[in-house]
Amino acid sequence: MSPERQDNDRLACFVCSLNLSGLTITKVILWLVAITIVSFAIGFGILAISGDFPPGAGQKASPFKNTVLGSPNTTSFLPDGASSGEIRILLGAGDLTLRGGAPGGRLMEATVYSKRPEMQPDYTESMNNSVKTVAMTETGHRKKDWVVANAPESWANTWDVRLGDEIPVAVTVNVGAGDCELLLGDSNLTSLTVNTGAGDTTIDLAGYHGGWFDAFIYHGVGDLTLRIPPGSNTRILLHQGVGDITANGMVQNNEQYTTAGFNPALPVNEITLSQGVGSIQLEAV
């Protein structure tokens, strides 16, 4: 195991050992410092270890040219006859917007804005039986001069990804450091997994009318807003470290929040939400 990985493990153990009961100012400060360090370590760890999204036997799409970009680049993927899809997004540092509305029957369309060719993503696509998988992975961690190349003035890295609604999709999003906005009311989900390290995150499911799904949201440091349709049969299981919680239009029972009229005997959209430091806004709108 590398020294960097050992250091990250020690930090994680330190954070886990902190007791949130009987908080003092000193403990709150320790939480803020420790979780912030761990969140950034997770972000850079994602860049250093790309094992979450191996290319496998999938077909690799054409990468961006190794030139400084003067305009955004857009890449599209078709369902190719699949009955369901799987979308995997790995962004180490930058801002992500993920939403519905991919044009022309596409499974996914991604537009990338960045000043650095080192930050451009690789795409892989594969078909397993009737499931079409598309992975979008930032490649900056493969460059030996990644840290030097990404001085603060060069961190402008923005991804705008659109999903189609012709087939249901399982979505996995990993963002190390940066703001994340998921506008998924027009999508059709089978599952949603979101891992973010540091930055503000909005997950907006207002108006969602797709299929039933389970969601797992892990947010390190920053504010989190989650919006769901008030008429949906949704249950939120909340685990929070330090921060305020505001719930509008939800029924609270300890760390469980449900929509009004929730019926556990019916199909349920269950969302498990864990956050380290930051405020949480829950809205049934």
Image (cartoon, rainbow, N blue to C red):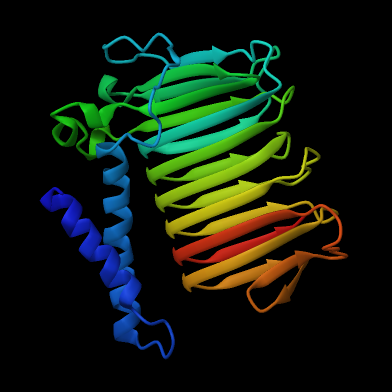
- Against 207, residue 73 (above or below) is above
Q: Give the quarter of the image for residue 22.
A: bottom left
Q: Relative to the observer, which residue lies in front, 257 or 9?
A: 9
Q: Relative to the observer, which residue lies in front, 167 or 157?
A: 167
Q: Give the quarter of the image for residue 122.
A: top left
Farthest residue to the bottom: give it.
22
Q: Give the quarter of the image for residue 100.
A: top right
Q: Quadrant of the C terminus?
A: bottom right
Q: Position of residue 90 (x, y in %)?
A: 41, 35
- Against 241, residue 284 (above or below) is above
Q: Position of residue 76 (x, y in %)?
A: 55, 14
Q: Position of residue 69 (x, y in %)?
A: 33, 15
Q: Position of residue 176 (x, y in %)?
A: 36, 45
Farthest residue to the front: give it.
129
Residue appearing at x 72%, y 61% in the figure: 235
Residue appearing at x 65%, y 31% in the figure: 169
- Give the side of residue 283 with respect to residue 241, left or right: right
Residue appearing at x 63%, y 26% in the figure: 85
Residue appearing at x 29%, y 35% in the figure: 155
Count of number-bearing discs = 0
- Give the side of residue 20 with respect to residue 249, left or right: left
- Against 268, residue 87 (above or below) is above
- Give the side of residue 19 with respect to residue 83, left or right: left
